[in-house]
Image (spheres, rainbow, N blue to C red):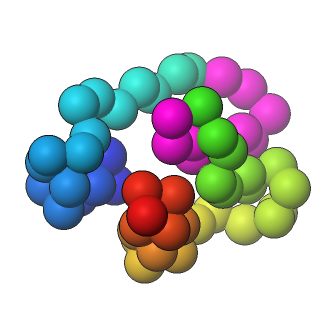
Amino acid sequence: MASELIMKWPENIAHVNLHAGSGGAYEVSVNGEQIWSKLESKQYPELKVVTDAVQAALG
């Protein structure tokens, strides 16, 4: 998913950070603002859901 996001917005996304964790966390943030939380939604995000949220966050 990270590569798809970078390819979609190469001028806006400088890097994607992946952090190993535990407890099933899958959090997506743009400029420090959380736009997706697997812990809150209880489901793994589909690419379209994340790209729509990133698009909205980028304006």
Q: Residue furthest front?
A: 59
Residue 20 seen in the figure: yes
Foreground residue among 27 and 22 = 27
40 vs 28, left or right, is right
Residue 54 appears in the rendering: no
The one nearer the camera, 54 or 4, is 54
- Viewer-closest of 8 and 42: 8
Left-right relation of 30 to 42: left
Magenta stretch: helix, strand or loop mostly? loop
| Quadrant of the image containing the C terminus | bottom left
Please tell me whether residue 28 belongs to the stretch shown in magenta.
yes
What is the quadrant of the N terminus in the image? bottom left
Q: Residue at x 57, y 41 (%)?
A: 29
Name which quarter of the figure residue 15 lies in: top left
Query: Residue 9 lies in what quarter of the image?
Result: bottom left
- The residue positioned 72% from the left and 39% from the top of the image is 25
Q: Considering depth in this image, is 25 or 32 the residue closer to the camera?
A: 32
Classify residue 4 by image quadrant: bottom left
Q: Image point 80% across, 33% down: which residue?
A: 23
The picture places residue 46, in percent across and down from the top left corner, at 50, 73
Indicate whether 14 appears above or below 10.
Answer: above
Range covered by the magenta-colored residues: 21-31
